[in-house]
Amino acid sequence: MLAALEELKRAKIPFWFEGVSALDQYYKVPNRPFFYVLVDGSLVDLAKILPGIRFPGREHIDAEFEQSDEAVVYFRCKETQGSRWTPSPLFSPLYDPIQGKYLDPLGVYGTLRKKSVDINEIGALRGYESALLIARYGFQIEPPKEELPRESTTLDVATQRDLLTLVLTGKHTASGLQFLFEMGYFHRYWPELGVLKDVSHSKEYHPEGDVWDHTTETFTYRKNPDLAISLALLLHDVGKPHAQTWEGRKFDKHAEIGTRIASQFLRRLGFPEPLVTKVLFLVRNHMMPGALKTLPIYRVEKVLESVWFPELLEVYRCDLSSTFRGPGGYYEACKVYRAFLRNKKNPFRTVEGKKIQRIREPFVMQRGRS
């Protein structure tokens, strides 16, 4: 159990996982970037037992606590429950990690079990809550045929970041992103990505569709919902709407352009700087593995030496596979990378694999002493 929750247990303060965290527990979703916890105590109680706790002043979070080696815990105090923000019914179940029991105060177990929501019930769900049910748990929810009234509240930047993180770290990310797109979230909150639908691809190289279709398709080939890789997949072609055609290249320098846009996007949403640095490396270099077999090693040696290069290969594999060209180029890049690692460790070869010619020192006879 998280250290913060162990402290609550020792202080005999009752607490429960709520919202997404309770549903993650129920559906056994392993990737949990943060935890939502309902506490039967006050902010004063939390401050006493958790030094360093922060009070962000967000609509549905009373306090947050983060340790360097653990996930962030978002606390909501029971005394404020119902006074401001309340979740939709499907997010009302609670989970008691001490007793290992679930609480279903609104009787939604049947709907949770069948993973399907009637189209007429969608008004009871916020759009982003529907996207979470789709992306993390595989719910079947169709966007409404008629446009719903815009939600009365605007998502603050931190909530946008958390929403995107939860969708990207779900098993069904592509479906969740598509739902958010059709509900207008991208055009409203993330216009850098909203314009991808307006950019067409050459059918010869991208039969899967436009840049948005291609972007969502990459997630269907992802092996695990790692956040850095997922953000890189989401942003890898964000520069294409702003790139020009040059010498036969339709989207010339889109990786460099996309890196600048991705930097602004990630920092605007407040993602941690180490994560931003890693994602920008992946976006900037996402096309490089495809050229490894023709590029001289000295030109790409720094990239190959990066601890993030294996993740770059995974981004390239998803990017390549989404075009239906098959993983051949990925395996070729892996072959070059393995050869580079072998040569790097070999003191008798250069990184290109060439033998190092050692110059022998001339033998000089020394005169004996008389």
Image (cartoon, rainbow, N blue to C red):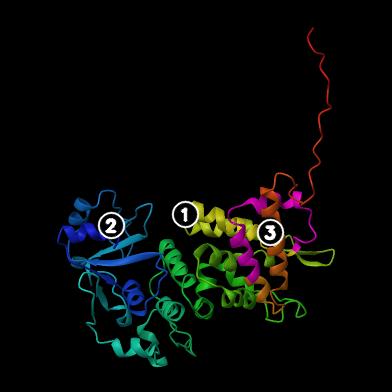
Q: Dot 3: what SS?
A: helix
Specify start and end residues of the magenta stretch as a single range.
Answer: 291-317
Q: Which mark is residue 353?
A: none
Residue wearing tag 2: 3
Q: Dot 1: what SS?
A: loop
Callouts 2 and 1 close, C-beta under 8 Å: no
Of residues 43 and 34, the one nearer the viewer is 34
CA distance for labels 2 and 1: 21 Å
Of badges 2 and 1, the one in the foreground is 2
- Which amino acid type is marked by label 1? Pro
Determine whether 114 is above or below 9 in the image: below
Q: Quadrant of the N terminus?
A: bottom left
Q: Residues within 10 Å of mark 2 (few under 14, many from 20)?
A: few
Of badges 1 and 3, the one in the foreground is 3
Q: Residue 171, how many percent across, how many down?
A: 48, 76
Quadrant of the rendered image containing residue 72: bottom left
Of residues 343 and 363, the one nearer the viewer is 363
Of badges 2 and 3, the one in the foreground is 3
- Which amino acid type is marked by label 2? Ala
The disc, 2 or 1, on the residue closer to the chain's N-terminal end is 2
**Residue 76 located left or right of residue 346:** left
Q: Which mark is residue 337?
A: 3
Q: Residue 349, how many percent across, how many down?
A: 75, 47
Q: Is residue 237 something that shows in the picture?
A: no
CA distance for labels 1 and 3: 29 Å
Q: Residue 67, how many percent across, how many down?
A: 34, 53
- Which amino acid type is marked by label 3? Tyr
Residue wearing tag 1: 272
Q: Residues within 10 Å of mark 1 (few under 14, many from 20)?
A: few
Secondary structure mainly formed by the magenta segment? helix
Q: Residue 232, how many percent across, how many down?
A: 58, 64
The disc, 1 or 3, on the residue closer to the chain's N-terminal end is 1
